[in-house]
Structure formats: C-alpha cells, structure tokens
Amino acid sequence: MRNMSSNQAKKDSIWKRILACRELYLMLLLPVIWYILFLYTPMYGIMIAFKDYRAARGIWGSEWIGLEHFKRFFSSFYFGRIVGNTLTINILSLLFGFPFPIFLALLLGELRNGKFRKVLQNVAYIPHFLSAVIVVSIMQLILNPNTGVYNMIRQWFGLPVTNYFASVGAFKPMYIISGIWQNMGWDAILYIAALAGIDTTLYEAASIDGAGRLQKIWHISLPGISSTITIMLLLRCGQIMNIGYEKVLLMQNSLNQASSDVISTYVYRVGILEGNFDYSTAISLFNSVCNILLLLLANAIAKRVNGTSLW
C-alpha cells in the first residue's frame, strides 16, 4: 500500500509540474508532431529495400526478395567509386575543416576591439545563410577560365588557364574549401558560447603568473572547451557517410563525375531519375547503418579516452 501511494504521489507531482509549465509543453508539441509525421511515420518505407517494389501493388503487396538489392549494390561498378568519394570528401573535410571554427572562436575571444570583433563575426556568419546555388555561382564567377579573377591572376604570373569545374582532381579541393568558408562562422558559435562559460579568474591568475596569450589559450581556453570539441567531433563522425546532394549536383558534370559522384547523388540518380525506389532505398539504408556504427564506435573511443560522450 505504501508503494502504491508513493507511486501515485509521484504521478501527481509529475502532472502538477507539467501543468505548471504547460505553455512550454505546448510549444514543444508542434516539433514533436512534425518529427512523428515526417521522420518516424515514413520509416515503415524501409521495407522497400527488401522488396521488389511495384507501385501498383504497394509496399505490402510487393514481392519480398531479401538482400538482393544490397548484393546488387555491393557488386556494382559504382560501389567502390561512390563510397570512396564519399569517405574521402568527408574525412578531408573533417581533417581540414573541423579546426577552423575552433581557431575562429579563439581568435574572436582574444580580440579586444569590440566593434572589429562584431564586424568579423558578422562577416564569418553570413556565408552560412547563402544557398548552395549562390555559393556555386560565386565559385563559377571566381574560377571562370575566361573572366574569373583567379585565372586572371594566374595569367599575370604566366601560369596556364585552368577550367577547374572540368577537372577531376579539382572537385574535392573546391568542395572542401567552399564548405569551410561557408560553415566556419556558424560552427564557431558553440565554441564562442563555451569560451564565455570559462571562469575569468583563471585568466587573471595566469596573467599574474606571467602567462602569455598563447599559453592561456593552450592551458585554459582549449581545456575549457574540450568537452564541446569532443561532442562536435562525435556528431561529425556520425555524419561521415553523409554528403548533401544539392551542392554536389550543382558542381557536377560529365567531366568531373568520377571524382564527384557520391552516395547521395547516386541515390538521386537511380531513385528519382530512374525510378528504382527499392534499390535506392537499400543504398540509403546501408548509408544510415554505416553512420550509426561509426557514431557508436567514435562515442566508445571518446568515452574511453577522456570520459566525454553523447550517452
């Protein structure tokens, strides 16, 4: 009886807290409904990956064929190319792009001129709000072989003009560099917020001990945001098999396709353009499973190394 009464008291207290914060729960209701309708409800469509899907028969009426689509994908000529391109682009983006937001946040934290810091912050944030179409258009204007500024500068130094959008070797550097420029300022926001939470008395004590700016950054700032860095790195590892298709499609052409064809563009091509919904679903499911496994592995390693993890 005592256990029943204590459980009832807990339930009553929970409902009282919910009623006290009912406005917040009502605000939370809309995104929850959105996630259920557009993310969780369509998950039953994963079954298409294991069926010979025919629209006239529907998902339940289509023939079950098991892992045939996965076998077809693994034995496909495109498997090595698109998986290799996806991994290469994401790993290089992680290696070269991940430190830039941290560096920018540390730089902004060291600036003493408030006006200049605000201007630099705004300049760094703006590219994030540009669409992929605008970013690629800017790249085309700069790298145009006839009128582009970059090729004009090359001509002044006696170097040959190069059409970078037609070059297989230039696609990955262009994609990675433009991605760093576009996302660096936005990604730095979390690190700036983490730096703001560091106790200022630590910097004062370090100054009294004669520490310089670099020493304070190395011994106070970086350790103070190390947990944030770890969490962001884990989230990036969980997306290492994902590349948005919009920007890649805008940069892609028949001349650089060997270097630019990734999983998302291949899924778009065989799923949307060719209508192979079952085959493209199988590829997307394989991609998602790989991301989950990579996230679990990265989380386990981070938890063992420094005790910081997502769960």
Image (cartoon, rainbow, N blue to C red):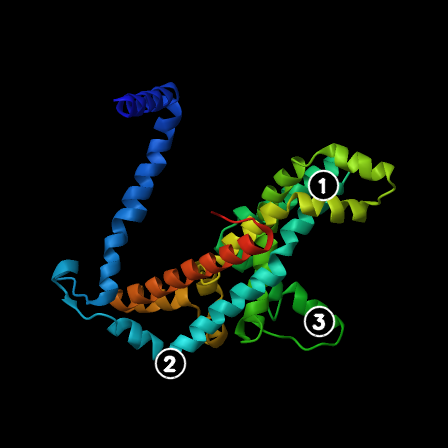
Which secondary structure lies at badge 2?
helix
Residue pointed to by mark 2: 77
Q: Position of residue 267 (x, y in %)?
A: 35, 66
Amino acid at the residue labelled 1: Gly
Name the mark nearer the viewer: 3 or 1: 1
Residue 154 is tagged as: 3
Q: Which residue lies furthest to the front in this view?
A: 1
- Give the distance between the C-alpha atoms of the residues marked 1 and 2, in whole angstroms: 50 Å
Residue in the picture at 26% in, 59% down = 46
Dot placed on the residue nearer the N-terminal end, 2 or 3? 2
At label 3, counting other C-alpha atoms closer than 10 Å, the crowd grade (few under 14, some 14-19, many 20 or more) is few
Q: Is mark 1 on a helix, strand or loop?
A: helix
Q: In this view, does 144 lie to the left or right of 256?
A: right
Question: What is the three-letter code of the residue carrying label 3?
Answer: Arg
For the point 53% across and 58% down, the residue is 301
Q: Is residue 212 above or below residue 157?
A: above
Determine whether, in the image, residue 45 is placed left or right of residue 116.
Answer: left
Q: Tag 2 or tag 1, which sits nearer the N-term?
A: 2
Out of 154 and 77, give the one closest to the viewer: 77
Q: Which of 226 and 157 is in front in this view?
A: 226
In the image: residue 9, left or right of residue 201? left
The Cα–Cα distance between marks 2 and 3, rounded to whole angstroms, is 38 Å
Q: Which residue occupies 48% across, 71% down?
A: 85
The image shows residue 207 at horizontal and vertical percentages of: 84, 38
- The residue tagged with tag 3: helix, strand or loop? helix
Task: Work out whether mark 3 precedes mark 1 in sequence or the reverse, and give the earlier one.
Answer: 1
Q: Quadrant of residue 170?
A: bottom right
State whether residue 50 appears in this view: yes
Q: How crowded is mark 1: few (under 14 residues within 10 Å), some or many (20 or more)?
A: some
Residue pointed to by mark 1: 109
